[in-house]
Image (cartoon, rainbow, N blue to C red):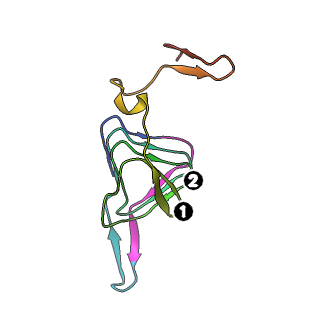
Amino acid sequence: MEIGAYAAFAGHDSRVLSHSVDLARDAQVAYPVIIGERSFVGTRSLLLGGAVLPPRSILAAGSVLTRRADVGEPGLWAGAPAKFKGPVNGAWFTRSRMSTSRVYVPETDQTVEDAI
């Protein structure tokens, strides 16, 4: 598995399955899984062998990313199998630190700096 700079494999119970059985060949087969730079993998996601999440993308919670011939567009990928849903933007994709210590509080619409 390859995880790009500033990318996050986040959430609970996400999995990568790089190995499977090639039934035609009666053999084990392994494909790399790549998560592009500054991308985010949501909770309970499944990435299958050969899957590529493009740079600056989000894999939505509960999605299944399968092997594709093309890398695809950067943006939101969601569903089972995951399909491109549209572009994404935000401070996450341009941050200069690996993790965030900021906390957003919806009740007050305030962001607390260095909260963690």
Question: Which one is earlier in the sequence, the residue at label 1 or at label 2?
Answer: 2
Q: Quadrant of residue 94?
A: top left
Q: Amino acid at mark 2?
A: Gly
Q: Judge left or right: residue 7 versus residue 116.
A: left
Left or right: residue 71 compared with residue 83: left
**Which stretch did the figure color magenta?**
10-21
Magenta region includes residue 109: no
> What amino acid is labelled 1 in the image?
Ala
Distance CA(mark 1)–CA(mark 2) = 8 Å
Residue at the outermost front position: 86
Q: Residue 78: horizontal and vertical position, in percent?
A: 51, 54
Residue 104 spot, x, y in % from top left: 57, 22
Q: Is residue 81 left or right of residue 36?
A: right
Q: Is 19 in the magenta?
A: yes
Q: Secondary structure at mark 1?
A: loop
Height in image: 29 above or below 114? Answer: below
Residue 45 lies, in percent from the top left, at 52, 52
Instruction: In this rendered view, identify the residue nearer to me: 24 or 57.
Output: 57
Could you tell me which residue is drawn at 39 percent across and 42 percent down? 39
Q: Quadrant of residue 71?
A: bottom left
Q: Closest to the observer: 90 or 100?
A: 90
Residue 74 location, x and y as percent?
36, 48
Q: What is the residue that sits farthest to the right in this orientation?
A: 107
The residue beneath circle 1 is: 80
Query: Are the two marked residues, 1 and 2, in contact with CB atoms closer than 8 angstroms?
Result: yes
- Read off the residue under disc 2: 62
Q: Check residue 105 in the rendering and tell me which mark sits there, or answer none.
A: none
